[in-house]
Amino acid sequence: MQDHSDVEDNLALIENVLVKIGEHLRVKEKAETHRKKLEEIVAQNSTPTVPPSATTQPTAAHPNVKLPELKLPVFDGKLEQWISFRDRFNQAVHNRTDLSGLQKLQYLLASLDGEPSNLLSAIPIQDSSYDQAYTQLTEKYEQTREIVYRHVQQIMEVRSINSRSASSLENILSTVSNALSSISALSIDTASSDFYTVSIVVNKLDSATKLRFHQGLPDKALPTWVTLKDFLAKEITDLASVESPSTNQQQQSKVNYKAATSRGKLIFVFCSDEHANFSCPRFHSMSDAEKQKQVELKKLC
């Protein structure tokens, strides 16, 4: 009986040993599995999975594009120039969908000078900064009331015509037209103030031009700006067709000569000293050919 009991004890001991060996083998197997997984993870992190060709493809967000060949406007902070700058910049850069925010920002900063440039000097040069910069600039200079005031002042202060010419009429027409266009760009109806605009401009005209304009109107009719603008455009064309460069030079010389004699003494236009032409030492030192050339050049005869 004792021997049988010893055998059972030995079998139980062997069974316990086998169980422990089995548990050890299972733990070792799991450890080996985890080790292999770790090696795979390390290998994946150390080897790039993106094909080399993919790194050279341009992204859709930053296409390699260039602006059209044009000179961008420069804005230096003058309110009366803001609308013109805004519209031209929007067309050339802001409204384009093929430019990234970073590219638009660089073009915007390159188009600013003086106060506007200082306003955005601290903005980060990155893709997301463009919208912020554009909004900041717009909020600063999109001052509708003040812009309208400035353009109305331009109309009121346009130079009056003393001597009827194509250039003097062109100055009035371009100044007033540009001012009204800038006001209209602010969604303001300028047609309702035609009577005011026409009254100012007509009073800037010389008497002959004013008479010609009124003679072409129906009796007692209140003219519109379009009517006056078309009249001025035709006058400019007609005058330019009959004015010659030599005539313009001669008129300018007469003006200079009158200015020189306005104080009762002749001021020689060649050296600008206050003396008569015949007593100018520089004139006397010239040869006869040089004297003749200067007389013809200055239109003194």
Image (tube, grey):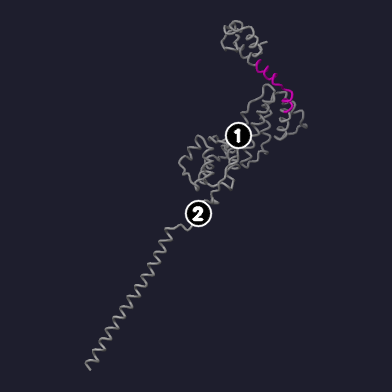
**Residue 22 sits above or below residue 150 on the image:** below
Neighbour tally class for label 2: few under 14, some 14-19, many 20 plus, Cα within 10 Å: few
Q: Which residue is mark 2?
A: 52
Task: Check if residue 248 falls in the magenta segment.
Answer: yes
Q: Position of residue 160 (x, y in %)?
A: 65, 25
Residue 59, position in %: x, y? 54, 51
Position of the C terminus, as image quadrant, is: top right
Q: Which circle, 2 or 1, is nearer the viewer? A: 2
Given residues 124 and 114, the one toward you in this image is: 124
Magenta stretch, residue numbers: 237-254
Magenta run includes residue 291: no
Extreme-left residue of the structure: 2
Task: Please tell me whether residue 17 is drawn above or below residue 293 in the rendered image.
Answer: below
Residue plotted at (66% across, 38% down): 190
Q: Considering the whole magenta stretch, tell me its main secondary structure.
A: helix
Which one is nearer the viewer's eye here, 144 or 49? 49
Q: Earlier in the sequence, mark 2 or mark 1?
A: 2
State the residue at coordinates (26%, 86%).
10
Q: Secondary structure at mark 2?
A: helix
Tell whether 11 sits left or right of 270: left
Q: Which residue is mark 1?
A: 151
Mark 2 residue type: Pro
Residue 277 location (% of width, % of height): 61, 8
Look at 42% across and 61% down and name the residue there.
Answer: 43
Q: CA distance from mark 2 to mark 1?
A: 59 Å
Q: Quarter-wise, where is residue 79 in the image? A: top right
Question: Residue type at mark 1?
Answer: His
- Pointer 2 and pointer 1: residues touching (CB < 8 Å)? no
Depth check, front residue: 153 or 219:
153
Q: Is residue 121 above or below residue 255?
A: below
Q: Name the quarter where the N terminus is drawn.
A: bottom left
